[in-house]
Every structure is written in structure tokens, then in C-alpha cells.
């Protein structure tokens, strides 16, 4: 049966069908094992493209230990590669004991390690290599490698090769290719193992250096463990003898074949000689030293993508060396450094004891000494340790090991120094803590110091000693103090209660600052800080007068509304200084969280009171002046509506019992003077606006800006830049030109920027020695410092405007401005012909035909809904007014000296019947385009009604309006002129634009009378109640 099985195996191997041997049911297990190990030698010559004589055997000493240099366990009958041992008892029928189970021994026991064991499982490790004579614990999780190790342990061949993986490779127990491994590794023995199912834990002992030659295929044959060991050994020996006979039969072919393959025979002879010499010198297979044999083996190597589970290895031997003085010196230095390392860190003593327990005299053996030094270096680089493992020259290996132990000694010394410093620091802190605790105990026993709780409670009560706390608030404070005394110092509730008491006791209960009620002193302070703003100053002086008569002060809520840069925020600070009140400002622009006003609930982490309570704590008085800036820019979000939260705060009837969410006790804010600022009132909710007293803060005219620049802005800029009056001289004409052509806005913020720009350039000229002081700035050289003018003129038309163009006056948040209304005829549909009495029938028919037509009114200029409605009203009224013959009545005018006079004492018509008919038909039937210039600026409002009517009548009549005329007022459908706002800003804008005649509604006379005399100077103003009073003024 064995001969037939073996013959079938040789025949399949000759045909190159090794898979048939593996999977055939007619091949026994010993033959499969044997052919699996010897498949690289039994290859068919036709398949490998080589002569049959080149087939050769692997030497016998590659599979057994018959040389006597090392063997596996003699009692096991198993050779190092898992095959039956040829040196076992052949005819011992009693040796049929099954293989021992894979149970780890209880302790490390001496083992007979085979000297040559070329085919071993390949275990890839990371971190640091394993050196010979050292022990390492390895945990394997790869299932393929686990099964392989289990089979090897089951066959009593617990040997493997451990190789270090190269950097930047996958962290696994199995290498995917040879390129991932370092070729030099360690042959290890596995004395103990722990099989955990999904992983296996191995205790390995390194024995010698080996080199990985190539990977070989994994033996997947399941050994027949039920077969007696002696019988299996006998079968294998008989299979080997049959293999020798088969090889001899291959070599005994006809002479013609030999002749044709004579070159191959010579190669075979030479290869056999190399094999013999190799067998006599090293116990390594000669197949690795022959080029042809390498070619044969390469056909059985795994691909680069196949995992390396089993590899063929060779033993590595160090070079011969002489124990010279240099080697002795290197050894002595390594021993000395190792002793120093052990003295620094006793942990390293275990490595030395492991070498001593192995029975090696480390100090006298440079080979083991170099390995010991490298193995002790825990902080060494992986490549440096691998270099020690690969070095075969003992002298170089000692030097490499010495460098590593020196580095390890320096590292250990540094660690020891750091450890001593840390330990000393910890000791000092511990000592200080112990002394402080002892000191606290001593002081407490002597009555010199109390507990932390008692100290905190006493501090809170000391705060309340001089305060007039309401009874309801005092009850809450006492309850919280009692709760604080029973709470643990380290609890979270303790910190919450302490913070709450800190806020309650920090408020100025009953503390007010003494107010100055001297009107003269207050007026002096207000005039020092601000120029103009008479309305604001008058209101503050009235508040002082009322407080002086009443003998007490009450809080008020004022709202300063005006364009940016007019001093709304700064005047509040001056008011606080004049009244001797503490000043606190916070902005609510963009605020969308109610908690900023009324505080957070105490249940939240990091809760705080609102801005009002923070103000009282900071000012330490109950009657400060609180400025709420930008109240017209409040936001609204999912956190609530701050505008609604301000209703309680700014209501004099409610803020006496203001309730903050954090404090949860009522606070009296009735003595606080609240001042708010806004640029416009439209965005403020009506309930909130109703609670405030609104004071309009108008923009500055040219004279006011000039005075402000000379009194405040220029001295402040020169002082900030380090200049004095002797180095810079600024002419009044330069400031006036700066105001007219660069800074036309209502405020002075932009004017301040330009003045600072001039001063900076002058400072640069002085430092750079470009000019000698003093440097004069006038209207001629102003462009050198501030560049070219931004505005040259407000007027699109210099003097006389064409028909259909009228100048109006507008108000914006930035102040007043001049606004033109332009009308033109797009596509005339009617051409007026004089009336012919002889052909009245024809004329009437033509008029009837024309009257059926209807014109189109086109509107442009980025106008709002209100302004579009005003245009529609103006067009309707202008048509009716022209059809009625443009009746006019008396008009009241105000001259330069302020006296009023009437013109046109009786009602009269300004248009003839022909002109009236023509104008009415034109407005009714022509396509008119009405445009307001500066289309990029949105415009809306009803105050341009009279201007639109005048523009339409001017186009219809073909007459231009009088030069330097501007007007404002809302028009009704019946022609009444209604009042408008922003009279001061509009008059200032008209005067800035060179207007001499202004038409205003009669109801706005009071607003005009309140203007300063220098604003009304050189102006002729007409106050009208109906449009028929405007027509004669505009077209006279």
C-alpha cells in the first residue's frame, strides 16, 4: 500500500500536480507530509524547463539532528519540522503512545533545542526585537497563525521564528509580504502557552539568531494522530528510500538523453559538490546556495500579497574574534554602565538576573554582554536595536551596545533627577499643608481664628451693618445664612448659596449719593462739555429746579433722539457730573436675551443678575444715572423680547418694586435717572416709547460745527498728538471748507476724524523736518491734508431750474437734505390748438375725442409706498387745480427781521382760460415721468406733496419756478397743506444749499420760531395753509 501510495505521489509530482497529492483520498498522511516538505526538490523537469538531472534532495541534516549538535526531545519521536523522526526506534511496537496534549508546563524546564530547524512559523512583532537568552510574552490574535502554532505544539515542536516588522507597516501578527519584515530575527522556544480561543498567549525564550530566506507554503495536512508513532516513523523512512530509488531511476536514462543534456549534468555535478561542502561545514540546506535550486524554489514561493506564515531560515553565527584589549575595555565599560543603570533604577536588575539564571557568565562573554546591554535599553530606537541584532562582528556589536547603554544611563539619570525634583516639590507642598492645618487648629484652640463658614457669615453680616435693608430682604438673607452654616464646604449648594449672599449683601441698600441742585453750577458744567443742545440742557435744569423746590429727587426716563454724532451719549455723562450722580452705561443694540436685563434663574450654572443689578453693585448707590444706549436697535430671539422686559424697568410706577430673576427680591429703582438714546423712534415699540420723555436732538449747523471744532475737537486732537498751539495754526476758512465739502452730516464725528487726520500729517511733517513750525492750514492747502473734496454742491441746478423741476426738503436719520422732484413729458398725446369760433362744432368733436384718452404716470427713484400715494394725490389735485384756473389767495410771509406781511390781498386767477384748459388736458392725457434723483437711496414719506404738485403744474404750464426756492409740506386731496417734521434739519439743509426762500406749512410756524436767530438769518419763509397760497409765490 505504501509503495502504491508513494508511486502515485511521485507520478503526480512529476506531472506538476501537487494539489492532487494534497486532496487525493488514496494518499496517506505520512506521504502528504513528506511530499509537502520536499516539494521544491521533486519537480518535473519538463515543467521547470530544466533537465531531469537537476532535481536534487534537501540534505538530511536539515530535517533531523543526527549530527549531534542539537536535537528535539528524544522521547517524542518527532523531528523539528513536525515529521516523524528518522532516529526514533524503528521496530519498537510498544511506542504507540499518542502525542501529548497541548497543556502548558507549570514551570520553565530545560529543553533540548535542535541546532538546525530551518522551517519555522513566522511571528511578526513590533516595538523592539527579541534577543537570544531573553524571555518575552507574546499575544497572537491572527487565526491562521494560531492554528499553525496549535499544530506545532500538538506535534511537540514548539519552535518559531520571531522577526521585527519594519516601521510604517500594519500592526499585526502576520506579515503580508517579506518586505514588511527585517530578515534577521530570533529562533525561540515556546515553553508555556495559554490558549484563550480567539487568541493565544505565548511565553517565548530566544536561543539564537536566524535569517529568513524565503516563505514557504503552509502545511494544511491534518496529521493522523491515531497512528502509532513508531509505525509512522517506519512509513516515512520507507518513503524516503523509495524517493532515492526514484531519483536514481531518473538519472539512468538512455545515453542520447544524457548527451543532449550534458551541460546540465555538469551543472548538477557542481551543485552536488557545493551541497556536500555545505553539509560538512554548516547544517544548512544547500538548496539556498544554488542558483538553479533558487529558481526551483521561487516557483513555490508565495506571492508578495500572500501572508508569511511559515518561512525557511538559516542559522547566523557571529564572526570569529579574539579577546583583545579593546574588546575587554568595551566589555568592562558596558558592565560599569550597566551597574550604574541598576543603581539608578532597580527594575533593570531583572534583566541581569534573567541572564545569570540562564547559566551565562555575562561579564566574560562579549556575545551575551552585548545582547544584555541592548535588551536593557527601553528607550532606544527600534532600528538601533535591530542593528545590534543583525551585527555579526562582535567588536562592532559591543560598540553599538555601549552607545545604547550610555543613552539609557543618561535617560535614567535625567528621570531620577526629575523624580527627585517632583518628590521634593510634593514633600514641600505636603509639609506646608500640614503646617497650615496645624496652625489653623492652634488658632482655633486659642480663639484667634474661626472656621471658614463662621468667617464667611461674619463677612456678610459686616457688610449689612451700615445698610438700611428692607425687612423682606433681611428675612431672605437670614434664611440663606442659616442654610449656609449647615452646608458642607465642598458641596455645590454651598457655592451657590455663598454667591447669592454675596450679591444680596453687595447691593447699596439705602445708600444714595448727595445731589448738587445748584442750577448755576449745573449750567456751567453742561456748557463746558457741550456746545448748543439747548433743549437738553433746559430739560435737565428744569429737573434740578423741581427737585430743589420739592426737597427730594425722583427718577425720570428721558430719551434723546437724533442723528449720529450729535453728542447724545456724551451729554449723559455731563448730566451725571452736573447732578453729582454715579454714571453707568450699557448698550442694548442687538440684544435678544431677556436675561441681560432681568438676570438668570439661580438654578442655572453660572447664573448672574441682570445689568441693572450689576449697575447698582458697581456704582454703590441707589440713585445713579443709567444710560441705556441704542434702544431703537433692540433685537428679539427665542430667549425672549428685551423690549418687553424694559417696560417694567422704565415705568416710574413699577420700577419701585423691580424684581430680578436671580435675586428674587424687590429692588427700588425709583430714584434712578434713566436716559436712553436712539437714532429714530419708528423702531421703538409704542408701549415703550410712551413711557419715555422724548427730546429731539437736532444736528449742528455750520456755525455750531465751527464753534465745536475750535473749542473742543482741535485742542483735543493736538493734545493727543503731542502738539501745542505754537506749532499748528488752522484757519477758520479751512474749517468752514472742511464742514461744507467734507463733513456735511449732522454730527461732528466725521469732522473730528478729519481734524485728527490734519493733525497727524502735521506731526509727521514736523518730525520729518519737512516744514518749520508753525505750520498753517488754510482753505488753499487743505487738500494736501485731507484730499479732494467729497461734495462740491448740494444743488443739481445752479440757479434757474427748467420747467417740471422743483426743489424740496427731506429729513433723514443723518439730518436734513435737499431733494429734487423732476417731471417730464415722455410721449405727448395732445397738441393744443387755439379756439376757433367759426368751427366750434369741429373743435368740440376734437375735444371730445381727446378727452377719451388717458395719460400714463411713470414713477422712478426707489420710492416707498407712502411717497407713491403722495404722487397719486398730487397728480389728481394738480389736474383739478389747473382745470379751475389756478385760483390764488393771500399768503403770509416772514422777512429777515421776523415781521410778517400779506401779499395778494384778494383772490385772483394766475392762469388764463386757455392756459388753464391746456394745462388740465396735458396732465390728464400726456405720459408723464416723475423721478426723484439718487435712485440708490430708498425714499419714503408724505412731506414732498406740495413739491410734487408744483413740479407737475410747472411742467403743464411750461413755466419754471422762481430761483432759490425750496418747499416742504404734505398735500391733501383738496389742497390743504398739512404739517411735517424735522423743520430744523430741513431749514439747515436749505441754508447749506444756498436757498433764500422757503415755503412751510402754517402749523409748523412754532417749530420755526424755536430756531436760533443765526439759523433764520437771510431766509424768507412763507407759511401756507392751502396750495393756492403757494402757486403765486412759486411762479411769481
Image: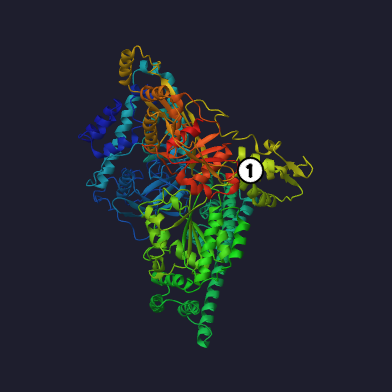
Name the colour scheme.
Answer: rainbow
Instruction: Report whether 712 appears left or right of 483.
Output: right
Q: Nearer the viewer, residue 375 or 581?
A: 581
Q: Quadrant of the N terminus?
A: top left
Q: What percent of the width, then of the height, locates residue 389?
A: 51, 46
User: Can see residue 386?
Assistant: no
The residue at the point 55 percent across, 58 percent down is 537
| Position above or below: 959 against 436 | above
| Position above or below: 900 against 423 | above
Q: What percent of the width, then of the height, locates residue 399?
A: 60, 49
Q: What percent of the width, then of the height, locates residue 669?
A: 44, 67
Which residue lies most toward the bottom here? 446
Q: Residues within 10 Å of mark 1 (few under 14, many from 20)?
A: some
Q: Nearer the viewer, residue 136 or 393?
A: 136
The residue at the point 55 percent across, 68 percent down is 423
Which residue lies most toward the right here? 772
Instruction: Report whether 11 appears left or right of 354.
Output: left
Residue, disc 1: 754
**Helix or strand or loop: what does disc 1 sit on?**
helix
Quadrant assignment, res 118: top left
Q: Nearer the viewer, residue 721 or 746?
A: 746
Quadrant assignment, res 847: top left
Q: Nearer the viewer, residue 135 or 307?
A: 307
Q: What percent of the width, then of the height, locates residue 224?
A: 23, 44
User: Can see residue 565?
Assistant: yes
Amino acid at each position: 500500500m505504501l509503495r502504491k501510495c508513494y508511486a502515485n505521489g511521485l507520478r503526480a509530482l512529476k506531472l506538476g500536480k501537487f494539489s492532487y497529492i494534497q486532496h487525493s483520498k488514496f494518499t496517506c498522511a505520512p506521504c502528504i507530509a513528506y511530499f509537502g516538505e520536499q516539494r521544491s526538490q521533486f519537480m518535473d523537469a519538463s515543467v521547470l524547463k530544466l533537465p531531469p538531472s537537476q532535481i536534487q534532495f534537501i540534505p538530511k541534516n536539515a530535517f533531523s539532528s543526527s549530527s549531534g549538535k542539537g536535537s528535539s526531545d528524544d522521547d517524542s519521536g518527532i523531528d523539528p519540522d513536525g515529521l516523524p523522526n528518522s532516529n526514533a526506534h524503528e521496530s519498537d511496537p510498544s511506542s504507540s503512545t499518542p502525542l501529548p496534549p497541548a497543556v502548558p508546563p507549570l514551570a520553565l524546564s530545560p529543553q533540548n533545542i535542535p541546532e538546525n530547524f530551518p522551517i519555522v512559523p513566522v511571528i511578526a512583532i513590533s516595538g523592539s526585537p527579541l534577543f537570544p537568552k531573553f524571555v518575552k510574552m507574546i499575544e497572537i490574535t491572527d487565526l491562521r497563525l494560531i492554528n499553525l502554532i496549535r499544530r506545532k505544539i500538538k506535534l511537540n515542536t514548539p519552535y518559531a521564528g520571531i522577526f521585527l516588522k519594519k516601521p510604517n507597516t500594519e500592526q499585526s501578527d502576520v506579515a503580508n509580504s517579506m518586505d514588511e519584515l527585517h530578515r534577521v530575527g530570533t529562533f525561540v522556544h515556546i515553553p508555556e502557552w495559554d490558549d484563550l480561543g480567539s487568541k493565544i498567549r505565548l511565553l517565548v525564550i530566544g536561543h539564537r539568531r536566524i535569517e529568513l530566506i524565503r516563505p514557504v507554503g503552509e502545511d494544511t495536512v491534518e496529521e493522523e494522530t491515531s497512528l502509532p508513532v513508531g509505525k509512522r516513523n517506519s512509513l516515512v523512512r520507507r518513503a524516503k528510500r523509495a524517493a532515492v530509488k526514484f531519483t536514481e531511476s531518473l538519472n539512468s536514462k538512455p545515453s542520447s538523453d544524457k548527451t543532449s543534456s550534458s551541460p546540465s549534468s555538469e551543472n548538477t555535478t557542481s551543485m552536488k559538490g557545493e551541497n556536500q561542502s555545505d553539509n560538512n561545514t554548516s547544517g544548512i540546506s544547500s538548496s539556498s546556495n544554488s542558483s538553479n535550486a533558487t529558481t526551483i524554489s521561487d516557483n513555490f514561493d508565495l506571492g508578495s500579497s500572500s501572508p508569511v506564515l511559515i518561512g525557511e531560515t538559516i542559522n547566523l553565527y557571529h564572526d570569529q574574534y579574539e579577546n583583545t584589549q579593546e574588546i575587554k575595555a568595551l566589555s568592562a565599560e558596558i558592565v560599569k554602565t550597566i551597574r550604574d543603570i541598576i543603581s539608578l533604577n532597580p527594575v533593570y536588575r531583572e534583566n541581569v538576573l534573567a541572564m545569570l539564571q540562564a547559566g551565562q557568565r555575562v561579564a566574560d562573554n562579549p556575545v551575551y554582554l552585548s545582547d544584555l546591554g541592548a535588551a536593557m535599553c527601553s528607550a532606544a530606537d527600534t532600528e538601533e536595536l535591530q542593528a545590534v541584532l543583525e551585527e555579526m562582528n562582535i567588536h562592532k556589536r559591543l560598540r553599538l551596545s555601549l552607545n545604547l547603554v550610555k543613552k539609557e544611563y543618561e535617560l535614567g539619570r535625567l528621570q531620577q533627577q526629575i523624580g527627585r525634583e517632583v518628590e521634593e516639590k510634593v514633600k514641600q507642598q505636603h509639609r506646608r499643608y500640614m503646617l497650615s492645618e496645624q496652625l489653623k487648629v492652634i488658632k482655633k484652640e486659642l480663639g484667634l481664628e474661626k472656621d471658614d463658614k463662621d468667617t464667611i457669615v461674619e463677612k456678610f453680616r459686616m457688610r449689612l451693618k451700615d445698610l438700611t435693608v428692607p425687612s423682606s430682604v433681611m428675612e431672605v438673607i437670614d434664611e440663606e445664612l442659616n442654610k449656609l452654616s449647615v452646608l458642607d464646604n465642598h458641596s455645590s449648594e454651598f457655592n451657590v448659596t455663598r454667591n447669592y449672599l454675596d450679591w444680596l449683601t453687595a447691593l447699596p441698600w439705602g445708600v444714595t449719593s448727595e445731589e448738587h441742585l445748584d442750577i448755576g453750577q449745573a449750567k456751567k458744567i453742561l456748557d463746558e462739555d457741550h456746545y448748543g443742545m439747548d433743549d437738553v440742557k433746559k430739560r435737565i435744569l428744569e429737573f434740578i429746579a423741581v427737585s430743589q423746590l420739592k426737597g427730594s429727587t425722583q427718577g425720570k426716563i428721558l430719551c434723546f433722539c437724533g442723528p449720529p454724532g450729535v453728542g447724545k451719549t456724551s451729554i449723559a455723562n455731563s448730566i451725571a457730573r452736573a447732578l453729582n450722580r454715579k454714571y453707568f452705561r450699557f448698550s442694548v443694540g442687538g440684544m435678544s436675551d431677556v436675561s441681560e436685563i432681568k438676570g438668570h434663574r439661580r438654578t442655572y450654572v453660572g447664573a448672574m443678575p441682570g445689568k441693572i443689578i450689576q449697575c447698582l453693585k458697581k456704582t454703590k448707590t441707589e440713585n445713579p444715572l443709567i444710560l441705556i444706549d441704542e434702544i431703537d436697535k433692540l433685537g428679539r430671539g427665542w430667549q425672549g423680547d428685551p423690549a418687553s422686559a424694559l417696560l417694567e424697568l422704565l415705568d416710574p410706577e413699577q420700577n419701585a418694586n423691580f424684581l430680578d430673576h436671580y435675586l428674587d427680591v424687590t429692588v427700588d429703582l425709583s430714584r434712578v435717572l434713566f436716559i436712553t438714546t436712539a437714532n429714530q423712534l419708528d423702531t421703538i415699540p409704542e408701549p415703550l416709547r410712551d413711557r419715555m420723555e422724548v427730546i429731539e436732538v437736532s444736528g449742528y449747523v455750520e456755525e455750531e460745527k465751527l464753534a465745536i471744532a475750535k473749542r473742543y475737537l482741535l485742542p483735543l486732537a493736538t493734545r493727543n498728538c503731542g502738539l501745542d498751539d505754537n506749532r499748528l495754526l488752522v484757519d477758520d476758512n479751512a474749517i468752514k471748507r472742511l464742514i461744507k465739502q467734507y463733513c456735511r452730516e449732522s454730527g461732528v464725528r466725521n469732522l473730528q476724524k478729519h481734524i485728527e487726520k490734519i493733525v497727524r500729517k502735521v506731526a509727521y511733517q514736523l518730525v520729518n523736518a519737512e516744514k518749520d513750525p508753525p505750520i498753517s492750514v488754510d482753505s488753499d492747502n487743505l487738500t494736501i491734508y485731507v484730499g479732494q473734496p467729497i461734495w462740491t454742491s448740494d444743488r443739481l441746478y445752479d440757479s434757474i431750474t427748467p420747467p417740471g423741476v422743483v426743489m424740496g426738503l427731506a429729513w433723514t436719520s443723518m439730518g436734513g437734505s435737499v431733494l429734487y422732484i423732476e417731471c417730464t413729458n415722455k410721449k405727448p398725446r395732445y397738441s393744443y390748438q387755439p379756439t376757433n369760433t367759426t368751427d366750434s362744432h369741429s373743435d368740440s368733436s376734437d375735444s371730445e375725442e381727446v378727452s377719451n384718452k388717458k395719460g400714463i404716470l411713470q414713477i422712478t427713484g426707489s420710492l416707498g409706498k407712502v411717497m407713491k400715494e403722495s404722487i397719486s394725490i398730487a397728480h389728481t389735485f394738480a389736474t383739478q387745480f389747473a382745470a379751475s384756473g389756478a385760483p390764488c389767495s393771500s399768503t403770509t410771509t416772514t422777512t429777515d427781521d421776523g415781521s410778517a406781511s400779506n401779499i395778494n390781498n384778494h383772490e385772483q386767477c394766475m392762469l388764463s382760460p386757455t392756459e388753464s384748459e391746456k394745462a388740465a388736458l396735458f396732465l390728464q392725457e400726456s405720459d408723464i415721468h416723475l423721478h426723484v434723483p439718487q435712485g440708490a437711496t430708498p425714499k419714503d414719506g408724505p412731506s414732498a406733496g406740495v413739491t410734487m404738485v408744483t413740479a407737475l403744474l410747472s411742467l403743464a404750464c411750461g413755466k419754471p419756478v422762481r430761483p432759490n426756492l425750496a418747499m416742504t409740506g404734505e398735500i391733501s386731496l383738496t389742497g390743504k397743506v398739512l404739517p411735517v417734521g424735522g423743520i430744523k434739519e430741513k431749514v439747515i439743509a436749505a441754508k447749506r444749499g444756498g436757498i433764500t426762500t422757503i415755503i412751510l406749512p402754517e402749523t409748523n410756524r412754532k417749530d420755526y420760531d424755536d430756531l436760533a436767530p443765526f439759523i433764520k438769518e437771510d431766509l424768507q419763509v412763507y407759511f401756507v395753509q392751502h396750495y393756492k397760497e403757494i402757486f403765486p409765490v412759486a411762479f411769481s
